[in-house]
Amino acid sequence: MPKGEVAIVVERCKGCGICVEFCPTHVLELASAFNSKGYHPPHIVNPDKCSGCGLCGMYCPDFAIFGWRTDTPATKEGAHAG
Amino acid sequence: MQADPKGVLTGTHFMDGDHACCEGALAAGARFAAGYPITPSTEVVERFATRIPTVGGTFIQMEDELAASIAIAGAAWAGVKAFTVTSGPGFSLMMEHIGYAAMTETPAVFVNVQRGGPSTGLPTLPAQSDMMQARWGSHGDYEVIAVCPSSPQECFDLTIKAFNLAEEYRTPVMVMMDEVVGHMTERVVIPPAEEIEITPRRHTHKPPEEFRLFDTGPDLVPEMVYAGEGYKFHVTGVTHDERGYPVITPQAQDRLVRRICEKIRIAADKITMIEEADTEDADVVVVSYGITSRVAQRAIDLAKERGAKVGKLRLLTAWPFPDKEIARLAAKVKALVVPEINLGQMVREVERAAGGRCKVIPVSHAGGSVHRPETILEVILGAAR
Amino acid sequence: MSEGLCTLTTIENNPVEQFLRTDRLPHIWCSGCGIGTTVNCFAQALIDSKAEINKTVVVSGIGCTGRVAGHVLLDSFHTTHGRAIPFATGMKLANPSLNVVVYSGDGDLFAIGGNHIMHAARRNIDLKVICVNNFTYAMTGGQTAPTTPLGANTSTASYGNYDEPFNIPHLMDAVGAVYVARWTTFHVKQLERSMTELLKKKGFGFIEILSPCPVLFQRRNKLGDSVETMKFYKQHCKIKNGAPTSEVGILPGEDITIGTFVNRERPDYIAQMRRHLSGQLGEKFVNEGVPACCA
C-alpha cells in the first residue's frame, strides 16, 4: 500500500525534471505528452512506491507538484492569519 | 481635518525658513523623515530630529540621499506622512525615487533648499537653478507639483500645503526653497492646531475583496491602503494594471502613464496658487518666485515711482505651470519680465505660455546672491518704453 | 502510450498555495531556476514560524529574485534596483509591528545595494534578508556580479572573470548581522528550517541561498542543467554550522561550506533608539509608536 499520494498541476510545470530525479523511490517520469507551453510534466509511473515524503513538492520551483502522506491528514495548518 | 496639536508649535516665532519648514511638516502631520546632511538644508532635519521624539515619530539619518528618498516611500506605505530634505547634489541623487513615487502614486514631500550649481557649486549661497529639474529630473513621463516659498512664514504655510497636495493627488510634491529663504530669520506665526487644515490620507473604505489598488474615479486619483491591514496588495515601479500587477504592454503603458499625468493636469486650476497685483492696465508684468519675488517687489515699487505701469505675478506654485494666467497677461501687456537666480529656466515656460503675444525678457543670474533691485528695475523700465 | 496527465489547476491541500498569487502562475522564472524553490521554502517557513501573515511584508529589488514580491500573496513591494533595504527600513520604522522581509538577488543587494545592506546590518534594523545568489545578473542577460567566481564566463567577461568576488557571509558577519547562514536550493529541509529561524529572530538576519541559473550562468560555464547543479550541490557542499565566516569563501574547484554561521544577540535598532531616547527624555519621550495618518 502506498503511504503517499502526489498531485500535479500540469500547466504550471516547466519540465525541469528535479522531482523525477530526486524522488527517493522513483515514482515519477517525465511524460511524452506536453502541456500548452510545450513542457513535459511528470506523471506517476510507480504510484505504489510513493512514501508521501513530500520532497517533490519541496523542490518544485513552479509549485506544480505536491506530495503528501495518506496515513495522516494533510491540512492547511499553522498559518496565523492574524 | 484639523492638525494634530502634538505637532503644532502655536505662537509667534522668530525663526529661519529651514526651521519654519520643519514646523510646517510637523503641523501637517509628518511623523517620519529620512535625510542626509547637505548645506543649506540640514537644519530642517536637525530640528526634526530634535523635535520628533517628543511629538511621536521617527527620524533616521540615512547613508545617502538615495536611501533617504526611498525610505520615505516605505514609510508612506506603512501609513505615515513622510518627507525628506536636500539641496542640489542630493536632489540629483533622489531623482530615481521621485520617479518611483510618481509611478507608484506614493504621497511624499521632497524639500530642496536650492544652492548654486551645477555639481558641488556654491554650497552656502543661493540659486534657483533646479526648477526645471524639479519638473523633468526623473526619466519618463510624469507630473509634479512644486511650491515656492518666499519667506520663512511661507516655508511654514507652503510646506503644509505641500503635504496636503501630496495626499490629495497621491503624488510627490516638491518644496522649492532657496538658501536665502532657508537661512533668513523672520517672524513666523503658527496658529492653533484647530485653525490648520490638513488633508488626510485617502484611505479606502472598501474591504479587501472589493479593493483594487489602482482603481480610480473621475478625479483619476486612486485610494490608498497600508501594509499590515490585510489587503495583501502589490506595488511595483514596473508599468502595472489596476491590480498593481506588472503588465509590460503599450496598452497598459498608455492607460497608466496617461492617467498619472492627467490626474495633475485636469486639476491644474485647483492646484495653481499665484499672487497677482496691478496687472489690469500694466505695460509690464514681472513674473517671479521664491526670494527673487521680494527683490522684484522692490524693483516694481521703484519703477512705479518713476511712472511706469508695472504689475506683478508671483508664482507660489511653479508646477503645474500657470499657463492660463500667463496667456491672459501676455495678451494685454507689452512685456513679461522674468528675473530668476538661474540662466533661464521658468522663463522658458513663460515664453511657451505667452505664445508670442508679448515680449518675454529674462533677467538671469548665475547664482550666489539675489539680484540687485536696480538690475531688475533697468529691465522693467526698458521694457515699458 | 496512455499517460493520464493530471487535470488539476490548483493543489488545494498544499499549504503553500495560500501564499501565492496563483493568478500569476506559471511564473516568469526559467525552467529549473532555483528561485521558485526558495519561495516554496519561504512559504513553508511562514507556516512553521507562525508568522502573522497580515503583518508580513515582502520587499524586493530589481532582478530575477526581485520578482518574488510580485508572486507572493502578501503586502509586497517591488522597489528600485538596490534600494529594497532602505525602503524596508522606512517601512519598519514607520510601523514597527510589521515583519519586514527583504527578498532580492546577489547583484541587487551587494553591488548597487551594497552600501545599504552594510548600514542596515550595522544598525541592526529588524529586517529579514533573503539573498538568492546565482552568481550573475540574470534578468539582464548574465553579466558579472560581485559574487561571480574567478574565471567564470559572463556576458561582460567573455574571456573569463578576473574580478575578485565577495565572501558574502564574511561580509555580513563583519558588518554586524545577527544571523548569517548559507544554504542551497538542494538543501531544502535545512533552508526551510533556517528561514523559520530567521523569521523568528529579532534584528538584521541574512540567508544566502545558492541557486542555479540554468539558462545563463550554468549554460555559459558548462555546468549542466538544473538537475546537474543540484547534484553538484549535494556532492560538493559541506555543512559546517558555526564555521568562521572568513573561511567560507567560494573558490573554484573546491567544496562549498554551507550552514548557519552566525546566530547572536544584539538589541535591534528600534529597541536601542527607544531605550536611549526614553533614558534621555524621560516622560517627554513619546513612545507609542507611529500612528497611521488616515482620518
Image: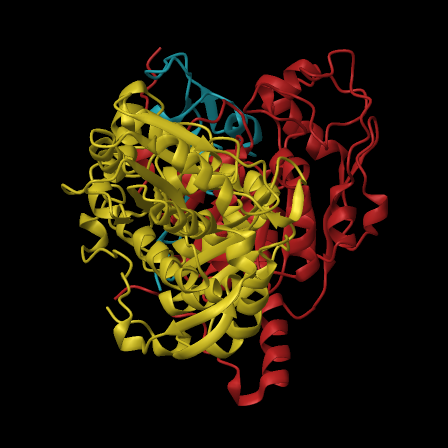
Q: Nearer the viewer, residue B71 or B149?
A: B149
Q: Is residue B215 left or right of residue B312?
A: left
At 66% from the left and 71% from the top, the residue drawn is: C267
Q: Can residue B5 be seen in this view?
A: yes
**Screen quadrant of the C terminus of chain C:** bottom left
Q: In which quarter of the image is residue B326?
A: top left
The residue closer to the viewer here, B296 or C66, is: B296
Residue C84, placed above or below residue B142:
below
Is B74 displayed left or right of C275 in the figure? Answer: left
Q: Chain A is drawn in which colour?
A: cyan
x and y, in percent, of residue B331 in the image: 20, 29
Q: Residue furthest front?
A: B306
- Residue B344 x/y as whole percent: 48, 30
- Give the x, y percent position of residue B108: 41, 51
What is chain B's hue in the picture? yellow
Residue at the spot x=82%, y=22% of the render?
A: C162
- Which of the two residues, B102 or B338, is positioned nearer the viewer here? B338
Q: In which quarter of the image is the N terminus of chain C?
A: top left
- Quarter of the image where one finds residue B311: top left
Q: Quadrant of residue C5?
A: top left
Indicate the chain coloured red by its letter: C
Can see residue A63? no
Residue nearer the viewer, C102 or B135? B135
From the top left corner, tell me how far across and down residue C253 is, in percent. 83, 26
Question: Furthest residue to the left?
Answer: B218
How many numbered marks does the figure carry? 0
Colour logic: by chain
Q: Is residue C83 left or right of residue C249?
A: left
Residue extending farthest to the bottom is C283
Residue positioned 51% across, 34% down in the render: B364
